[in-house]
Image: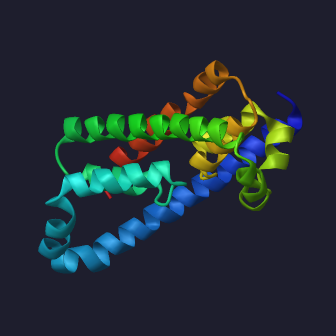
Amino acid sequence: MTKIKIQFFLKNLLQGMAYMTILAIAYFLFKNYVVDKDQALWLERFYENPLLIYLIYTFSEIFFGLFPPEIFMIWALYKGDSLHYWMNIIFFTSVSYGAGFLSFLIGRYLQRVVIFRYMSRRFFSRYWPLFRKYGSVLIVTAALTPLPWATICILVGTSQYPMKKFLWVALSRVFRFAVYGYLVFHTKAF
């Protein structure tokens, strides 16, 4: 890997760590100053209907990562015991990896549609130069940082990137969930 690719990856990784820190602080403040004041209201609203949470998460992962997965990890942390938490992390990881592959396949299909070529100039104009410059490193960076995972997967699919190689490189998404899941789990003491 060249120096430029390493710098790109590290820059986005640091942004991801900063993002995670901001999310942890926001969660801490929200929990202490909002949820603890009327805990029953908040817990009932979000913990009574896990199917709704799973559907929101799945929808979010398929459609451009509307909500960061860490929010769902925090939800799972207080849903049950540690076994239940880690089963949720496995579920979230599987959905995210699967959504990335689905986005890749959608990209493969869309690159043949003429109207998509015009639309891609608007939606992917920021990421095409990055993909041309960084290639697989962009996939790994999107898998590990707040770069939009589904968007990058669609972009990669439109570029005739080899499917087997994509599936192997996209496994780095599992690493993100393992590390972030571990960090969220150990913040329970706060």
Q: Position of residue 126 (x, y in %)?
A: 78, 57
Looking at the image, which residue is at 74% across and 30% down?
A: 160
Q: Nearer the viewer, residue 63 or 190?
A: 63
Which quadrant of the rendered structure holds the N terminus?
Answer: top right
Q: Quadrant of residue 78?
A: bottom left
Q: Nearer the viewer, residue 97 or 157?
A: 157
Q: Could you tell me if residue 106 is visible in this image?
A: yes
Question: In the current view of this chain or complex, which residue is farthest to the top?
Answer: 164
Looking at the image, which residue is at 70% across and 45% down?
A: 113
Q: Nearer the viewer, residue 116 or 107?
A: 116
Q: Position of residue 110 (x, y in %)?
A: 66, 43
Which quadrant of the rendered structure holds the C terminus?
Answer: bottom left
Looking at the image, which residue is at 57% across and 59% down?
A: 19
Q: Position of residue 80 (x, y in %)?
A: 17, 47
Q: Quadrant of residue 47?
A: bottom left
Q: Is residue 150 above or below residue 32?
A: above
Q: Could you tell me if residue 124 is visible in this image?
A: no
Looking at the image, which residue is at 46% across and 35% down?
A: 98
Q: Is residue 165 above or below residue 95?
A: above
Q: Is residue 66 above or below residue 162?
A: below
